[in-house]
């Protein structure tokens, strides 16, 4: 989830002054009686189908729609059913945006991940977002180097944050990046170093994957991955999926969990290092697990659709470095954050 890793930092700096494209009603074709099936958006890329199983997930006539644009580096998409909206981070800009079909685009929360006075931070904002079992917003905050909860209603966001975890064994985290919540309220999160600036002190000599159980106990689950990034749970919550954004070891892992939610074994299910290159921008980054158990995982070329066993079913080829994705409540659409754009694909 680090833009510099994709060699696009210079590009992002050049476009950072560009305001996101906020469509008015006339431009977007929105009227009082509009429904989402009537909207017309520009399309991009293509959907590569390597296995017929993908047709059970994505209709053959689906396109990749560009529903908003002009961000610095979009990340951490989260569907909020209570307000029928998508929110997502713009990490370098230290803000969260909200998108709805009816109202288009507006700032949801700013600042989102850093609250100090240092200037020139590369990735200060929030990254991964999730809801806890109480419906409160959880944020991986790069600049603050912590996992936090927003103590304000979803409908009325504010900068009232409380840290859930900001250190391990007395040492600051690197920069919590992505997270997933189990049905008992347990939280898994990754901690690569992408939010650290040159003047920050890296206090841990590893990049960890952590678990906070429903009692609030923090434990280190994995310390052997070079760049743990996106994270997700299987529908039965017996497996934990992790993407590694290391260009030399671009891999997706599956770890088995015991009855208490702790990792007890793991293996690589798909290695895509040979796909990394200019012709396939991006690396393994954020991911979402469909109710079928299939992974929709950012990677070289866009969003890779991967079976639970690690078979590559196809790729949503966005044509740009792609950071993350999520589904709405009914899995009607897949929403994708991809560099300066917010995309979506109609699901089956």
Image (cartoon, rainbow, N blue to C red):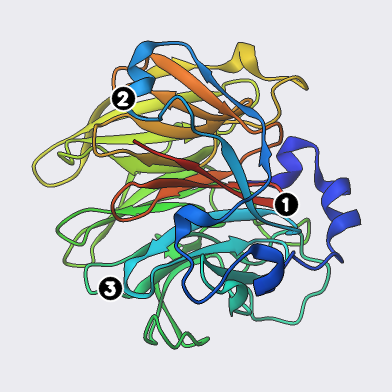
Q: Cβ–Cβ below 8 Å for labels 3 and 2?
A: no
Q: Quadrant of residue 121?
A: bottom right
The disc placed on residue 56 is 2
User: Given this view, does label 3 or label 2 mark the residue nearer the observer?
Assistant: 2
| Residue indicated by mark 3 | 135
Going 39% across and 80% down the picture, which residue do you hit? 154
Quadrant containing the C terminus in the rendered view: top left
Disc 2 is placed on an element classified as helix
The residue located at (71%, 36%) in the rendering is: 320
Mark 1 → mark 3, Cα distance in angstroms? 28 Å
User: Label 3 to label 2, Cα distance in Å?
Assistant: 31 Å
According to the picture, the residue beneath numbered tag 1 turns out to be: 340
Tell me which corner region of the image, top left, top right, bottom left or bottom right, holds residue 136: bottom left
In the image, residue 39 lies at what x, y percent?
56, 56
Q: Nearer the viewer, residue 327 or 176?
A: 327
- For discs 1 and 2, the disc positioned in front in the rendered view: 2
């Amino acid at each position: 989830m680090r833009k510099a890793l994709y060699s696009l930092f210079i590009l992002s700096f050049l476009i950072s002054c560009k305001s996101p494209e906020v469509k008015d009603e006339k431009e977007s074709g929105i009227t009082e009686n509009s429904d989402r099936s009537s909207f017309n958006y520009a399309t991009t890329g293509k959907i590569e189908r390597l296995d017929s199983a993908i047709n059970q997930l994505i209709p053959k006539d689906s396109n990749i729609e560009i529903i908003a644009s002009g961000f610095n580096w979009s990340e951490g998409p989260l569907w909020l059913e209570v307000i029928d909206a998508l929110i997502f981070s713009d990490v370098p800009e230290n803000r969260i945006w909200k998108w709805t079909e009816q109202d288009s685009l507006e700032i949801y929360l700013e600042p989102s991940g850093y609250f100090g006075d240092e200037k020139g931070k590369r990735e200060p904002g929030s990254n991964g977002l999730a809801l806890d079992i109480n419906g409160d917003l959880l944020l991986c905050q790069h600049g603050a180097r912590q996992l936090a909860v927003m103590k304000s209603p979803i409908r009325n966001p504010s900068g009232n944050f409380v840290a859930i975890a900001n250190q391990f064994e007395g040492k600051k985290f690197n920069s919590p990046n992505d997270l997933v919540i189990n049905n008992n309220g347990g939280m898994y999160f990754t901690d690569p170093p992408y939010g650290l600036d040159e003047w920050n002190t890296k206090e841990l000599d590893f990049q960890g994957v952590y678990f906070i159980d429903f009692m609030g106990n923090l434990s280190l689950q994995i310390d052997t991955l070079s760049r743990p990034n996106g994270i997700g749970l299987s529908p039965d919550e017996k497996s934990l999926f992790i993407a590694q954004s290391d260009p030399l070891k671009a891999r997706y892992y599956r770890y088995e969990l015991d009855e208490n939610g702790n990792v007890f074994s793991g293996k690589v299910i798909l290695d895509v290092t040979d796909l990394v290159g200019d012709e396939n921008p991006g690396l393994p980054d954020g991911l979402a697990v469909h109710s079928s158990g299939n992974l929709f995982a950012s990677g070289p070329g866009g969003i890779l659709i991967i079976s639970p066993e690690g078979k590559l079913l196809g790729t949503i080829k966005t044509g740009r470095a792609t950071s993350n994705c999520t589904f709405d409540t009914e899995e009607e659409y897949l929403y994708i954050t991809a560099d300066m754009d917010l995309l979506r694909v109609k699901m089956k």
